[in-house]
Image (cartoon, rainbow, N blue to C red):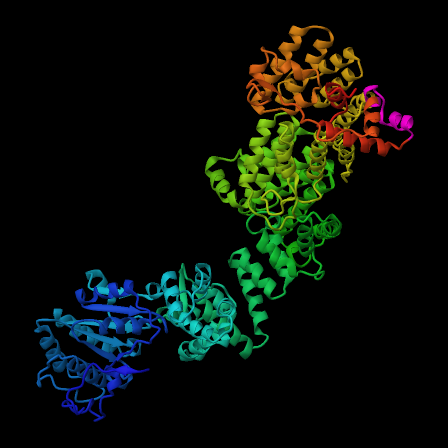
């Protein structure tokens, strides 16, 4: 390094004070020189401002790791100060107290401090006369202006006697001297006294670390301009270490793509590695080097864990000393430490080069210690790194953490850890992990064989304990409970509510055998059981029981609400992150229940809440989930067909697009909403096909079958087949109110008003209050009243339907009611109820029913022939036979005619054609 001297005693360079020490050796002038600053040095005003406090306190300590920028910082400060600063680089500190003081006295003289001849020089290299120190302290104390003395590399001062002598002079010189120590280690001085008296200025490693702005400035001085995120990444890797930033910048200057280099460089193959090996590792004793190499496999460590890796019992002393020496060992508190990231990279590379094959064993030892004393996540990481899948799976399952592989913030990291798990080894725990991994993706074909094999082995282990989790009663119970959780999930995915109920009952029994601390630690397991059970009950149509299970998750995160508040509240708090996605999923299913009950407003609110609460879960496959599908269904009820179609479109990046693709609830709901949208668009054939789409399930779902029949009946009604619609809906088991309304509408279309009225009377009073049911039922009754000639009752019933529909913007029931309703809505008594949400403004500003758009194209001759026969109430098959064409050809002509007329139903087409004078 280029150096500059503070000044020389005379122009010839002759030293008037003679030799430096009793040995007669001349002074080495470089030790008195303030180091020159490199061209790429970045001035850091925030630290210079802190150093400006040094003259106010007798002692200043600038302490940090090698390469932290200590010396250059103090050199910058010293070179720009008005009064001359005495500078000494303490490389002679190991040559004895006499030599050290000779150099320090010479540094003071070179800085212009006049010391009398009485002060003299140390007579011996190894000792200093106390009288000399007394005279130095007295003369310094008599100065009008204090002198600032900087001792660089003070960490070389290991002789306590020198430290005591310095402290003596500093204390007795009063305000005559300000001492600045630049050191890698904690100086041998009673710092606690100075701190208690407020007589010390300190700049430590954390403050020396570069800030993002400083790092960007340093890189710019090297010709490198990086965006903030890349600066941040480099800063995180170097921890703001000055030498690391500068050396990486210098290396990047010679690269074709500096930005890629700074993102991807391997520290052990750079000058950073050479620097740390030389300046840190090789300065340590052999035992310390061995410990550093071994703990490089750990993200963090405590002395006991380090001892487990070395087989010794000296880690506490070594780690404490390394931290005190700023040797790139960071104290995390509570006796836990970590290595600087770059130092750790270099040590691991060194470990692989010097002790090939030891790394796997170190990971195995770490996993064993952590399994007994540490967190599960670190246990799994080290067991996986060692390739010990038996231990990794055993830890996960035995800790009752199998549910974390299915949901929560740790699902993705755990999936990454176990992604390397192959077909071997085969233990109950590894089979459960494989099953959970596959079932979480909805892959029953791959997941079920693993689950069944694990269940058989665990049943066998109850009577014949073996190695692994099965040899410990608590861990065996945890494994069996985890197996039962997967049974409930598998039953949900296969559409088997009865098996889900049986597995849930087994789970309740097994919970009594599992230690309470494990259940408290893993609230996601209880939440998963209830969420899957609730979804299975929903499929079965047991809505009240489904709502109870789902609400237990949304309200309590799966914890037991009956528990005392003192024990429940911490559990609820702890479960928030672990059960966030489950709560969102259960909210979506509760929204579906509201939709099936005919309450669109409630359904929409819950679906939106589910989407807002659902965190990203990249482990689950894409495809619209129940919350999005419910919103699409509500949009269809409101006749917002474009919005419904947009919601149904694949959105793989949406938060709700993370649900198992083989969940029958979601698949059935998707088919039904798609069918309803197609029907609303006038595509009866597409609606029938979508409604008839098979959903593979072991047990049928009554509501799925009922709503599929409802859509099919609507398609048949639109195509002029009311008898078929009646047959579909009246043959359904149960008393679904929407199906009863649909059947009544079909009976009315078939000209059987008494049958329609009887069906409406079967709707239970509590069901009739649901908005969608109330609106549709009121419109059917209104049409019945019109058939009977009771115009006042018809008006009253339509008014009731409008008032109920307006709150939820339910437009679709009015669109599907038929042509009889359109002119009625524009009459004075009803128009105010329909204005603003159902009626469109006419040319004169008055409200009118939104009419279909005018014909954009003339009907072809064949389309007109089909339309004439349609008006004669002929079925599609009858029209085909009459015109000697196929049924598909008739359907094609109908679709084209519907498009040109701007309608989507058979009777609307006839009505519109008559209005246009085509019939």
Query: Where is residue 635 drawn, in percent x and y?
Result: 62, 31
Q: Is residue 911 left or right of residue 181?
A: right
Which quadrant, please, contains the N terminus? bottom left
Q: Nearer the viewer, residue 438 or 664?
A: 664
Q: Is residue 99 above or below residue 585?
A: below
Does 875 appear in magenta? yes
Residue 322 falls in image quadrant: bottom left
Secondary structure predominantly adopted by residues drawn in magenta: helix
Q: Nearer the viewer, residue 845 or 467?
A: 845
**Residue drawn where x is 27% and y is 80% of the image:** 90
Q: Nearer the viewer, residue 616 or 477?
A: 616
Q: Is residue 454 left or right of residue 222?
A: right
The answer to whether any part of residue 549 appears in the image is: no
Query: Where is residue 645 drawn, in percent x and y?
Result: 65, 37
Does 521 appear in magenta? no
Q: Is residue 579 above or below residue 595?
A: below
**Residue drawn where x is 51% and y is 58% of the image:** 374
Q: Is residue 133 above or below residue 338?
A: below
Query: Where is residue 468 drawn, in percent x and y?
Result: 65, 58
Residue 201 falls in image quadrant: bottom left
**Residue stretch rendered in magenta on the structure:** 869-884
Which quadrant, please, contains the C terminus? top right
The answer to whether any part of residue 831 appears in the image is: yes
How many marks on residues? 0
Query: Where is residue 477 drawn, in percent x and y?
Result: 64, 48
**Residue drawn where x is 75% and y is 14% of the image:** 756
Q: Nearer the viewer, residue 380 or 599?
A: 599
């Amino acid at each position: 390094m280029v150096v500059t001297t503070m000044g020389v005693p005379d122009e010839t360079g002759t030293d008037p004070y003679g030799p430096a020490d009793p040995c007669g050796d001349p002074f080495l002038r470089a030790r008195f020189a303030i180091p020159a600053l490199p061209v790429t040095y970045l001035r850091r005003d925030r630290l210079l401002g802190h150093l400006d406090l040094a003259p106010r306190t007798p002692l200043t300590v600038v302490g940090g790791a090698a390469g932290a920028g200590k010396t250059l910082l103090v050199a910058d400060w010293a070179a720009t100060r008005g009064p001359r600063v005495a500078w000494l680089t303490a490389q002679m500190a190991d040559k004895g107290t006499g030599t050290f003081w000779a150099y320090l006295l010479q540094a003071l003289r070179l800085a212009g401090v006049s010391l009398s001849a009485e002060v003299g020089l140390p007579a011996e290299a190894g000792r200093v006369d106390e009288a000399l120190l007394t005279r130095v302290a007295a003369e310094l104390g008599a100065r009008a202006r204090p002198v600032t003395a900087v001792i660089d590399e003070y960490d070389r001062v290991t002789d306590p006697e020198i430290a005591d002598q310095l402290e003596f002079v500093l204390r007795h010189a009063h305000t005559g001297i300000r001492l600045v120590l630049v050191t890698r280690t904690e100086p041998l001085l009673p710092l606690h006294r100075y701190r208690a008296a407020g007589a010390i200025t300190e700049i430590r490693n954390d403050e020396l670390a570069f800030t993002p702005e400083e790092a960007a400035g340093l890189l710019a001085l090297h010709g490198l301009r990086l965006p903030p995120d890349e600066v941040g990444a480099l800063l995180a890797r170097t921890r703001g270490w000055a030498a690391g930033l500068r050396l990486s910048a210098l290396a990047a200057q010679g690269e074709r793509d500096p930005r890629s280099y700074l993102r991807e460089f391997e520290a052990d193959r750079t000058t950073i590695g050479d620097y740390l090996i030389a300046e840190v590792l090789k300065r340590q004793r052999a035992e310390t080097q061995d410990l550093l190499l071994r703990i490089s496999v750990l993200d963090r460590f405590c002395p006991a864990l380090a001892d487990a890796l070395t087989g010794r019992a000296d880690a506490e002393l070594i780690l404490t000393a390394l931290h005190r020496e700023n040797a790139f060992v960071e104290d995390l508190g509570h006796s836990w430490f970590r290595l600087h990231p770059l130092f750790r990279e270099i040590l691991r590379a060194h470990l692989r080069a010097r002790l090939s094959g030891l790394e796997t064993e170190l990971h195995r030892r770490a996993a064993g210690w952590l399994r007994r004393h540490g967190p599960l996540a670190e246990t799994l990481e080290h067991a996986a790194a060692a390739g010990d899948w038996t231990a990794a799976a055993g830890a996960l399952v035995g800790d009752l953490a199998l549910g974390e592989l299915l949901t929560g913030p740790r699902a993705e990291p755990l999936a990454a850890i176990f992604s390397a798990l192959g077909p071997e080894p085969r233990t109950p725990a590894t089979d459960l992990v494989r099953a959970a991994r596959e079932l979480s993706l909805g892959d029953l074909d791959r997941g079920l064989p693993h689950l069944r094999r694990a269940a058989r082995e665990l049943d066998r282990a109850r009577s014949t304990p073996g190695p692994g989790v099965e040899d410990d009663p608590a861990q065996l119970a945890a494994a069996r409970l985890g197996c039962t959780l997967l049974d409930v999930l598998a039953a949900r995915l296969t559409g088997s509510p009865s098996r889900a109920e049986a597995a849930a009952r087994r789970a309740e029994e097994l919970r009594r055998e599992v230690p309470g601390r494990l259940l408290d630690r893993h609230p996601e397991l209880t939440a998963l059981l209830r969420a899957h059970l609730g979804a299975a009950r929903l499929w079965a149509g047991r809505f009240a029981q489904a709502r109870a299970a789902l609400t237990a998750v949304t309200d309590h995160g799966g914890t037991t609400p009956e528990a005392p508040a003192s024990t429940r509240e911490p559990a609820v708090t702890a479960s928030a992150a672990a059960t966030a996605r489950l709560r969102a999923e259960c909210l979506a299913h509760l929204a579906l229940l509201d939709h099936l009950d005919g309450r669109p407003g409630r359904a929409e609110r819950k679906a939106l809440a589910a989407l807002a609460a659902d965190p990203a879960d990249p482990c689950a496959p894409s495809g619209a989930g129940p919350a999005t599908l419910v919103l699409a269904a509500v949009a269809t009820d409101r006749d917002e067909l474009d919005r419904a179609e947009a919601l149904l479109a694949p959105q793989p990046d949406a938060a709700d697009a993370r649900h198992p693709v083989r969940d029958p609830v979601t698949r059935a709901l998707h088919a039904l909403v798609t069918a309803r949208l197609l029907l609303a668009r006038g595509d009866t054939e597409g609606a029938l096909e979508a409604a008839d789409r098979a959903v593979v399930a072991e047990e049928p779902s009554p509501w799925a079958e009922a709503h599929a029949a409802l859509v099919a009946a609507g398609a048949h009604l639109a195509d002029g087949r009311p008898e078929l619609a009646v047959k579909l809906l009246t043959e359904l088991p149960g008393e679904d109110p929407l199906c009863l309304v649909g059947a009544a509408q079909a009976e009315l279309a078939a000209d059987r008003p008494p049958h329609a009225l009887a069906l409406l009377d079967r709707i239970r009073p509590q069901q009739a209050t649901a908005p969608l049911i109330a609106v549709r039922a009121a419109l059917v009754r209104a049409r019945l009243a019109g058939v009977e000639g009771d115009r006042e009752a018809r008006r009253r019933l339509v008014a009731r339907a409008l008032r109920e529909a307006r709150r939820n913007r339910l437009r679709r029931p009015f669109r599907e009611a038929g042509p009889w309703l359109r002119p009625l809505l524009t009459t004075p008594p009803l128009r105010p109820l329909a204005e603003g949400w159902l009626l469109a403004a006419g040319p004169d500003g008055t409200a009118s029913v939104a009419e279909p758009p005018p014909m954009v194209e003339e009907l072809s001759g064949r389309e007109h022939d089909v339309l004439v026969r349609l008006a004669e109430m002929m079925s599609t098959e009858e029209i085909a036979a009459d015109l000697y064409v196929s049924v598909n050809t008739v359907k094609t002509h109908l679709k084209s005619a519907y498009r040109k007329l701007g309608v989507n139903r058979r009777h609307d087409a006839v009505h519109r054609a008559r209005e246009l004078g085509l019939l």
